[in-house]
Amino acid sequence: MKRKANSIRVILISLSIVAGANVARAQSASPSPAPTASPKAVETPTASPTPAPPPRVTGTGGHLELDDIIQVQVDHFSEWAATNDATKLVPFINGRAIRGNYPEEIHPDKNRLHFHLEITPANKEVWTDLLGAPTGTHHPVTFTIGLENQSPFDSVYGQDNPLPLTVISPVYGVIAFIVLLFTVILFLWLARTTNLIRETGTCPVPGKLRPYNLGRTQMAFWFFMIYASYFTIW
């Protein structure tokens, strides 16, 4: 009887162990819930910086004349000068750079520059072409400014709206003409009333002036030609 009871007990224990293993296996085989994906952060697009508008020549002050000071008004100049070297700007006349003619004053806060137009060894050829063989006291030209080795700024003074370049200053031209005219009148008066360009020696006819001397007359003619040329150039 005891053997049967022990056998039954062993069978019950074995069955309980098998049942427990099956339950554990069933629990481990049950699918686990899938992890929920965390929402991705929404990326906000960054706005690209707006490029500064290009500078543009919109006005001038003073006369466009050699050995004179001209003021140049440039829109958006302060923005351009913040990232560029404004001391290397030069005028452009008829599309040609006046090299070496850098600004004497720079006012980025007022969008304005001052240039003293002058001849230098670097720009002598350009000035000779601009001022040579004049047909009047003024000559219409396009005008702007820019860096020497780059394209110049846009300008309102283009082919449709040129600026007058003074070739011969009216004030100095009038002064030179008056001085030259006065000298010619004085010379003619002296030539008629004195022996300035006449023969040397005594006059054979008392009370009369000596006859004119060809050599002296030629020297006087060429003297006045050179004299008038220097005044015109001045």
Image (cartoon, grey):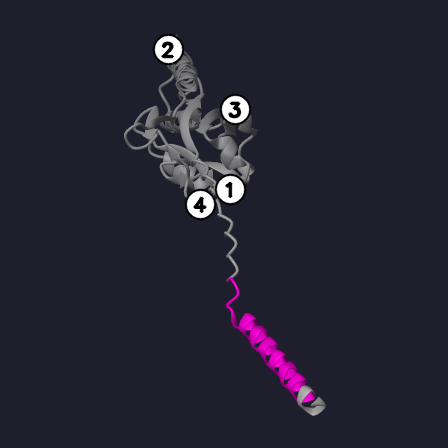
Extreme-front residue of the structure: 1
* Mark nearer the viewer, 2 or 3: 3
Q: Is residue 29 above or below residue 234?
A: below
The numbered disc on residue 110 is 3
Label 2 or label 3, whichever comes before in sequence order:
3
**In the rendered view, would you say 68 is above or below 153?**
above
Nearest-to-viewer mark from 2 and 1:
1
Check disc 3: other Cα within 10 Å, few if <14, some if 14-19, many if 20+: few
Q: Using the rendered view, name the quadrant where residue 200 is placed.
A: top left
Q: Position of residue 127 (x, y in %)?
A: 42, 36
As helix, strand or loop, the secondary structure at mark 2 comes to loop
Asked whether, in this view, residue 63 is left or right of residue 104, the answer is: left
Residue corresponding to mark 1? 121
Quarter the C terminus occupies: top left
Spatial CA span between label 2 and label 3: 75 Å
> For the residue marked with disc 1, what is the amino acid?
Pro
Amino acid type, residue under disc 4 in the picture: Gln
Residue 186 in the image: x percent, y percent? 42, 13
Membership of 7 in magenta stretch: yes
How many marks overall?
A: 4
Badge 4 crowding class, 10 Å Cα cut-off, few under 14, some 14 to 19, many 20 or more, is few
User: Is label 1 in a helix, a strand or a loop?
Assistant: loop
Seen in the picture, residue 133 relative to 46 is either above or below; the reply is above
Q: CA distance from mark 1 to mark 3?
A: 31 Å
Quarter holding residue 25: bottom right
Disc number for residue 150: 4
Q: Which residues are magenta?
A: 6-33
